[in-house]
Amino acid sequence: MSPEIIFISVLLGLAFVVGEAQPIINVLDHGAVGDGKRDDTQGFLKAWDAACLDSRSPTLVIPPGKTFLLSQISFEGPCNSSIHVQVGGNIVAPNKLWTSELVNWISFRNVNNLTIDGSGQIDGQGSIWWDCKNKRTFGISGCNNSRINGLKFINSPGKHLAIHKCSWVHIKGLNIAAPADSPNTDGMYIQNSEHVEVSDTIIGTGDDCIAIGTGSSDVNMTGITCGPGHGISETVACSGIVLESIGIALDPAAKGDRPTSYCLNAQGSKVGEVTPDVSCLE
Ligand SMILES: *[C@@H]1O[C@H](CO)[C@@H](O)[C@H](O)[C@H]1NC(C)=O
Ligand SMILES: *[C@@H]1O[C@H](CO)[C@@H](O)[C@H](O)[C@H]1NC(C)=O
Ligand SMILES: *[C@@H]1O[C@H](CO)[C@@H](O)[C@H](O)[C@H]1NC(C)=O
Ligand SMILES: *[C@@H]1O[C@H](CO)[C@@H](O)[C@H](O)[C@H]1NC(C)=O
């Protein structure tokens, strides 16, 4: 190798490092406190604006060891590049009723190439809602190519995770929990979405584990443990549903219904053991 070539390759190496560095945007640097008492909504929104404008595929960091109190919040796209949201800390809803037109407490809207992961817990403080209106904890809508990995969702006012008008969504390793007698606390609700994959997820709530709503297709579920809860239901006009290795177990502590599944106009197939049987799938 001649010295010139070595020189050039070193330069290219440096350019690569500088050009590809993915910025870290920490909510603590944008005014969030994380003491579980002060409202961190504005800090999160400022951090989101910085991330969304960045065209270098930033990581938005919600650091571990803290609890962030958020009011109803909507993270809006489109953004200038893919975004990775790392949820290390916990997020908690206000312990009072919040009112707004929006159905979700936390929404991500029109954000493509979004990855949300980490071991943080998202607590909807839902018990005050369970007698009245049906709000939801977390929703992503209008998106393509999303990943949600590893998070824990508890005690939603209503459905825990709603996927609406999205394509290519990969959900893995979630843990979703609410009391068996909490009303309408579906684990996951997938509507008007296609190419959705849900795997290795544990759901125990008061309503459906996973409900698939109208206009959905190519939805695959593997390794879902469900119970307590009503199982997996498909409502209208869904196709290409594949269930693989689904075990719906009744929580020994839960009294009442056996796990069931039901469907209407759903088409698809079963692979491996699927219990209870979903009769409409081949
Ligand atoms: C983000 O995208 C907008 C619209 O395409 C553009 O005007 C702006 O310069 C971009 N910002 C950055 C930081 O790249
Ligand atoms: C998302 O990824 C696709 C495919 O890699 C790319 O074409 C598109 O520009 C990306 N959009 C954003 C906002 O990152
Ligand atoms: C959506 O994401 C998939 C998977 O990354 C990609 O193949 C496809 O081109 C994207 N579609 C649009 C409209 O961006
Ligand atoms: C669902 O499974 C089918 C059959 O294995 C496969 O062809 C399809 O690509 C999968 N879809 C997703 C979104 O993973």
Image (spheres, helix red, strand yellow):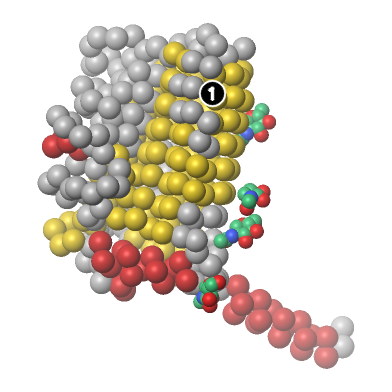
Query: Residue at 56% across / 43% down in the picture?
Result: 167
Seen at 55% across and 55% down, the residue is 113
Q: Residue furthest front?
A: 101
Q: Position of residue 225 (x, y in %)?
A: 42, 24
Mark 1 CB lies closer than 8 A to ligand 4? no
Residue 25 shows up from this direction: no
Q: Is residue 256 visible?
A: yes
* Residue 256 to residue 73: above or below: above
Callout 1: SS? loop
Q: Position of residue 141 (x, y in %)?
A: 45, 46
Residue 36 lies, in percent from the top left, at: 17, 56
**According to the image, label 1 marks what residue?**
237
Q: Is residue 12 left or right of residue 70?
A: right
- Kind of residue indicated by mark 1: Ala
Q: Residue at x 28, y 67 (%)?
A: 43
Q: Position of residue 163 (x, y in %)?
A: 44, 40
| Residue in the image at 33% along x and 61% along y | 63
Count of numbered circles in the view: 1
Viewer-closest of 24 and 231: 231
**Residue 191 position (above or below residue 141):** above
Q: Quadrant of ligand 4?
A: top right
Is residue 223 placed above or below 70 in the rendered structure? above
User: Which one is in front, 213 or 201?
Assistant: 213
Which residue is farthest bottom? 4
Q: Quadrant of residue 134?
A: top left
Q: Is residue 121 left or right of residue 125?
A: right
Q: From the viewer's perspective, is 277 left or right of 67?
A: right
Image quarter where the C terminus lies is top right
Q: Quadrant of the N terminus?
A: bottom right
> Quick one: label 1, few (<14), some, or many (20+) residues within 10 Å?
some
